[in-house]
Image: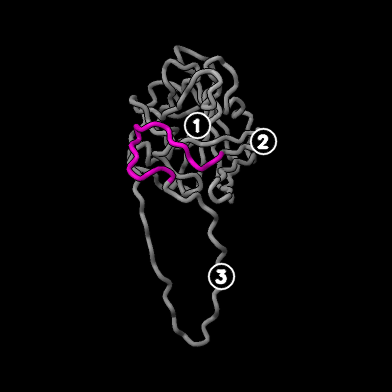
Amino acid sequence: MTTPISARPSARAAFGRGLALAAVAVWALVGCGGAADSGAPGASVPTPEPPPPATVPGPLVPPGTDLHAGPISLPLQLRLPTLQVSAPVLGVGITAHGAMDAPEGPPGNPIWQDAFWYRGGGVPGDDGTATIAGHVDDVLGRPALFAHLRDLHPGDPVVIHDTRSGVDVRFVVREVATYSVQQASQPAVLAAIYGAGPVAGTGPQPAPDGLAHLTLVTCAGDFVHGSYDHRVVVDAQRVG
């Protein structure tokens, strides 16, 4: 996987060390405007535009929440129908070492089956990039939430379900890639995972292609010196 995600160094499922992520301030930009009335007699009636796609109402965490604060429960579920995965989502920040947090617990703790949304990035479904990580295994090496993430293929569905409204924000997998930890620390790869804004420390920004992306990331490869040496990264694009 290619991302500055790291769990605590003592854990087998650690996402890796040395992949620093800039702390980010999320700025809310609100624009408004009105359509002008031509007033021309006999003007044609415009064709109504389709309603905008459903969104996940924000903010998902209290405004002003420090990125160094602990995990926060969110009213979201991550669903991967192909893998028969449905998981609650926690909002996480960064560790004291500047890496995306990946909470852990003792064997059997539900945390190993939770998904972690990086709250310094975009909201799932918004234009830009949202990032969700998950463990590949627990401290005993047993399969965790993203044990089979690498088995996803282009075209597979990804769903973010809002438990408040019942709204489903739908994505489709566009690419599945595996990176070494060294590759994962390269600026271009980090920007693909988190978006250019969070990596630069300027907050979420629209993606260069103007689309809404969701990145899923977990560990892979060999367990070396307390963490895995590769990352699996799934890029999904919103379709509904």
- Give the SS element for disc 1: strand
Magenta stretch in the rendered image: 60-77
Image coordinates of residue 66 in percent, x first then y, are: 33, 37
- Give the mark, 3 or 2, whose residue is nearer the N terminus: 3
Q: Which residue is mark 2?
A: 82
Q: Which residue is mark 3?
A: 48
Marks 2/1: CA–CA distance: 18 Å
Image coordinates of residue 215 in percent, x first then y, are: 51, 37
- Give the mark, 2 or 1, whose residue is nearer the N terminus: 2
Frontmost residue, 188 versus 132: 132
Image point (55%, 56%), residue name:
53
| Residue 210 visible in the current orientation | no
Marks 1/3: CA–CA distance: 39 Å
Frontmost residue, 111 versus 146: 111
Label 3: few (<14), some or many (≥20) within 10 Å? few
- Give the mark, 1 or 3, whose residue is nearer the N terminus: 3
- Give the SS element for disc 3: loop
Q: Which residue is mark 1?
A: 133
Image coordinates of residue 156 in percent, x first then y, are: 64, 39
Image coordinates of residue 176 in percent, x first then y, are: 57, 33
Q: Do the residues under discs 2 and 1 have CB atoms within 8 angstroms?
A: no
In the image, farthest residue toward the bottom: 41
Image point (59%, 29%), residue name:
149
Quadrant of res 226: top left
Image point (47%, 49%), residue name:
126
Q: Which three-letter amino acid code belongs to the residue tagged 3?
A: Pro
